[in-house]
Amino acid sequence: MIFNYLPTFAQATVGSIFSFQPRAIIFIDGSNLYHSLRNSFGSARIDFEKFCTLVGGGKKIMKIYYYTSPVSRLDEPESTRLNRSFLKGLVR
């Protein structure tokens, strides 16, 4: 009986069905991002599509998670309205 103890490796050629594109999942701490932008630039306005493309570094973005909490209803009514509008705009 003969046994082959040499390791074998699967190989694929470029362009084959086994080609691989690097992927990324992005997690955003909304409150931290907001306050960092306000402190650094005086405004928290940001194009999230461009931001995530930049953060993704050319990888295929599979999913984006944005974590935050809604503004308390005890705050100014205008702040609450703007926060709700912003959160609705994030959902696609």
Image (tube, rainbow, N blue to C red):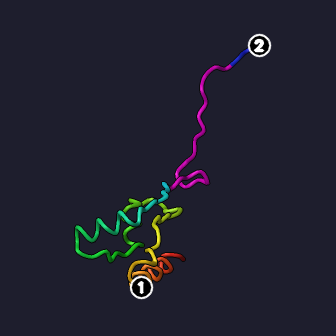
Residue at left offset 41%, top offset 66%: 30
User: Residue 77 — which label?
Assistant: 1
Q: Residue furthest top?
A: 1
Q: Residue furthest front?
A: 74
| Residue 86, above or below 27 | below
Q: Are marks 2 and 1 in contact (CB under 8 Å)?
A: no
In reply to whether residue 20 is colored magenta, the answer given is: yes
User: Residue 1 — which label?
Assistant: 2
Highlighted magenta segment, given as a residue range: 4-21
| Residue 45, above or below 1 | below
Dividing the picture into quadrants, the one containing residue 46 is: bottom left
- How far apart are labels 2 and 1 at the CA level? 82 Å
Residue type at mark 2 is: Met
In reply to whether residue 15 is colored magenta, the answer given is: yes
Dividing the picture into quadrants, the one containing residue 78 is: bottom left
Q: Residue furthest right?
A: 1
Mark 2 closeness class: few <14, some 14–19, many ≥20 residues within 10 Å:
few
Residue placed most toward the observer, 42 or 58: 42
Residue placed most toward the observer, 7 or 64: 64
Q: Position of residue 77 (x, y in %)?
A: 42, 85
The kind of secondary structure the magenta stretch mainly shows is loop
Residue placed most toward the observer, 82 or 41: 82
Mark 1 closeness class: few <14, some 14–19, many ≥20 residues within 10 Å:
few
Dividing the picture into quadrants, the one containing residue 41 is: bottom left
Residue at left offset 38%, top offset 59%: 57
Q: Position of residue 13 (x, y in %)?
A: 55, 48
User: Residue 90 — which label?
Assistant: none
| Residue 30, above or below 81 | above
